[in-house]
């Protein structure tokens, strides 16, 4: 919707103009939005395209682990909510691809990057959903972490991304609540149901804590993206906010976190937590998580099997266009 008349070429030639860069930074510092046709440093365009497309890929790959449970949801009500949630994730992917397209990269290019394995998507979606409780844990923890990370993105300096995030965050809040409600129901159910909820928490806790990315010391992009007000908080700050918000929720429903070092620190008023296994995050990002291969295979199959739909939609659009032209000519 935004892709017409973008000034990509002109901007590229003016990429390293210090005066334009200073004006750009002043605009950002004044909390004004950068819009698609505004001048922007090429590095800003590049890092935003990277972040937004990775985010879009995460949304559509994220449909897979939960889609796995639509046919097995325990009741009609649970099935309807899960169906709506998975559809929402597909919609989030579409808004985000549209926002990224405004920066001059086409959706086809972004898809090629995902399907060829060049582009990243969130590590969290490379873990399996083994029981129904995993659907609760994903909503509570994964969507909870996503909200913590994404609410500040509603204030991102790039207008189309910030605006897309407003609706996405409203929907993510519903996702988080439906997940927590599933966990609460299981935790207050039979001993077997409670054990299932505890097992899901045990398996999803650390991968959710890792979702926020490498530590601030290791983060490659945070300094510059915070200066450009794309990111508003560092990875570690967001991670701490997530832990602080989530631990009391888990304790409230009688669950224990799989971290013997988790302790409330009276001095800092934050929850201290144990060491993160960064080697696991690196391995999963590099393609060696439990489900990386399966997820990519499913996405490639969906892309191939959807080819006829894309071709039919294009043929139909062309037919309509031709009819409109013919009607115009006949009326003249
Ligand atoms: N999974 C995969 N890759 C990750 C990662 C993770 N959890 N965390 C970091 N990385 C990658 C980065 O993409 C970067 O790789 P690149 O240079 O090839 O792009 C590298 O590790 C170094 O990390 P940085 O901290 O320097 O990277 P960023 O500054 O981009 O921070 C981020 C990473 C916090 C994920 C940031 O990109 C971000 O906020 N993105 C927008 C939100 C998003 O994409 N969330 C993903 C989950 S979406 C979701 O959960 C859907 C919902 O429906 C549940």
Image (cartoon, rainbow, N blue to C red):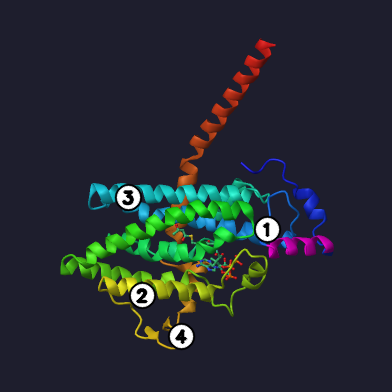
Pointer 3: residues within 10 angstroms few (<14), some, or many (20+)? some
User: What percent of the width, then of the height, locates residue 211?
Assistant: 47, 69
Marks 1 and 4, how far apart at CA: 34 Å
Going from N to C along the chain, the mark reached first, 3 or 2, is 3
Marks 1 and 2, how far apart at CA: 36 Å
Which region of the structure is painted magenta?
A: 19-30
Q: Classify mark 3: helix, strand or loop.
A: helix
Pointer 4: residues within 10 angstroms few (<14), some, or many (20+)? few
Question: Between tags 1 and 2, which lies in front?
Answer: 1
User: Mark on residue 52?
Assistant: none
Residue carrying label 3: 81
Residue carrying label 4: 268
Q: Classify mark 2: helix, strand or loop.
A: helix
Label 4 CB sits under 8 Å from any ligand 1 atom: no
User: What percent of the width, then of the height, locates residue 252?
Assistant: 28, 72
User: Quarter of the picture for ligand 1?
Assistant: bottom right
Point out the image quarter for the N terminus. Answer: top right
Going from N to C along the chain, the mark reached first, 1 or 3, is 1
Going from N to C along the chain, the mark reached first, 4 or 3, is 3
Question: Between tags 1 and 3, which lies in front?
Answer: 1
Depicted 329 relative to depicted 186: above or below: above
Q: Nearer the viewer, residue 44 or 226?
A: 226
Residue carrying label 2: 247
Marks 2 and 4, how far apart at CA: 16 Å
Question: Between tags 4 and 3, which lies in front?
Answer: 4
Residue carrying label 1: 32
Question: Between tags 2 and 4, which lies in front?
Answer: 4
Q: Classify mark 1: helix, strand or loop.
A: loop
User: What percent of the width, then of the height, locates residue 315?
Assistant: 56, 28
The reply to whether the magenta stretch includes residue 168 is no
Pointer 2: residues within 10 angstroms few (<14), some, or many (20+)? some
Give the residue at x 29% y 77%: 256
């Amino acid at each position: 919707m935004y892709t017409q008349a973008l000034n990509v070429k002109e901007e590229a030639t003016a990429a390293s103009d210090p005066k334009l860069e200073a004006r750009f930074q002043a605009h950002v510092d004044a909390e004004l939005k950068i819009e698609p046709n505004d001048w922007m440093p090429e590095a800003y365009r590049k890092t935003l395209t990277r972040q937004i497309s990775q985010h879009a890929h995460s949304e559509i790959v994220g449909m897979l682990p939960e889609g796995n449970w639509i046919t097995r949801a325990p009741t009609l009500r649970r099935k309807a909510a899960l169906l709506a949630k998975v559809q929402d994730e597909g919609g989030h992917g579409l808004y985000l691809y549209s926002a990224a397209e405004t920066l001059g990269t086409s959706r086809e290019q972004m898809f090629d990057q995902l399907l060829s394995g060049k582009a990243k998507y969130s590590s969290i979606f490379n873990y399996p959903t083994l029981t129904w409780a995993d659907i609760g844990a994903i909503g509570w923890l994964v969507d909870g972490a996503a909200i913590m990370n994404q609410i500040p993105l509603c204030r991102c300096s790039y207008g189309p991304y910030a605006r897309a995030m407003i609706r996405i965050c409203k929907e993510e809040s519903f996702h988080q609540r439906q997940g927590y409600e599933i966990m609460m129901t299981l935790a207050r159910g039979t001993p077997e149901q409670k054990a299932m909820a505890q097992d899901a928490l045990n398996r999803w806790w650390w991968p959710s804590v890792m979702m926020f990315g490498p530590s601030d010391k290791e983060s490659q992009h945070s300094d510059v993206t915070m200066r450009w007000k794309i990111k508003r908080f560092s990875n570690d700050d967001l991670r701490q906010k997530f832990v602080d918000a989530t631990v009391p929720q888990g304790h409230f429903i009688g669950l224990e976190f799989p971290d013997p070092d988790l302790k409330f620190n009276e001095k800092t008023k934050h929850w201290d937590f144990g060491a993160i296994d960064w080697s696991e995050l690196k391995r999963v990002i590099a393609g060696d998580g439990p489900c990386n291969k399966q997820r990519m295979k499913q996405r490639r199959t969906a892309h191939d099997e959807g080819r006829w739909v894309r071709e039919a939609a294009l043929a139909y659009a062309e037919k309509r266009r031709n009819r409109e032209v013919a009607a115009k000519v006949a009326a003249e």
